[in-house]
Image (cartoon, grey):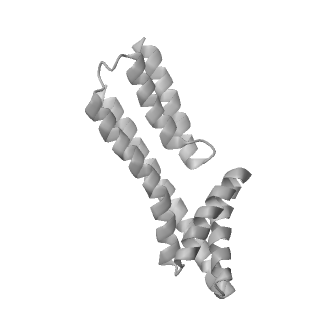
């Protein structure tokens, strides 16, 4: 049973990592879910409450990184608070348009918010690119943290 549980967990880890890079799938959710399924199938023989508590905190951190990295990129390139909100709305709307929408949505959202504030077009475009840099930087951080989660899983089992 533990071999089947491990195979399922590893498959969810792989799909989760792909989901972090191709945001159609909920990457961190699948990774944490793989760990939970493994625990349930093995009756939590090797993974205790502390393991899941630590992984749960890291899981929450991953979601925080998503928003903070995008906002940091927006602010670093001179974007306003409204541009941050525009990027967040653009990210949500972009989800409906696939992987390209997830990149274009925050860019257009931040840029549009800046244009509504009467910011010059060149500065609005700069803020849009800052949003993309933050988004991509956040993705790299999330990927690294998720890999650490998986390594910790294998250390504990």
Q: Position of residue 70 (x, y in %)?
A: 51, 65
Residue 125 placement (x, y as % from top left): 65, 78
Q: Residue furthest right?
A: 97
Kindly identify the residue that appears in the image at 47 percent across and 28 percent down: 10
Residue 122: x %, y % from top left: 66, 85
Q: Which residue appears at 57% of the width and 43% of the height?
A: 19
- Residue 49 in the image, given as x and y percentages of width and height: 28, 30
**Front residue of 34 and 89:** 89
Q: Is residue 135 left or right of residue 114?
A: left
Quadrant for residue 118, please give it: bottom right
Task: Report the quarter where the C terminus lies.
Answer: top left
Image height of 104 relative to 118, above or below: above
- The mark total stands at 0
**Is residue 12 placed above or below 142 in the rendered structure?**
above
List the single residue furthest toward the top: 1
Q: Quadrant of residue 147?
A: top left
- Depth check, front residue: 150 or 33: 33
Seen at 43% across and 11% down, the residue is 1
53 relative to 37 in the view: left or right: left
Indicate whether 121 appears above or below 140: below
Looking at the image, which residue is at 54% across and 46% down? Answer: 20
């Amino acid at each position: 049973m533990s071999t089947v549980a491990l195979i399922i967990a590893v498959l969810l880890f792989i799909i989760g990592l792909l989901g972090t890079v191709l945001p159609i799938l909920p990457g961190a959710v699948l990774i944490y879910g793989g760990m939970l399924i493994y625990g349930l199938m093995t009756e939590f023989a090797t993974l205790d409450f502390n393991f899941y508590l630590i992984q749960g905190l890291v899981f929450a951190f991953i979601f925080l990184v998503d928003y903070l990295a995008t906002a940091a990129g927006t602010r670093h390139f001179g974007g306003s608070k409204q541009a941050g909100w525009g990027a967040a709305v653009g990210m949500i709307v972009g989800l409906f348009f696939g992987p390209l929408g997830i990149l274009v949505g925050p860019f257009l959202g931040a840029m549009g918010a800046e244009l509504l504030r009467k910011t010059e077009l060149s500065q609005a475009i700069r803020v849009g690119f800052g949003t993309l840099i933050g988004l991509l930087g956040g993705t790299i951080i999330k990927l690294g943290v998720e890999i650490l989660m998986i390594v910790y899983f294998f250390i504990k089992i």
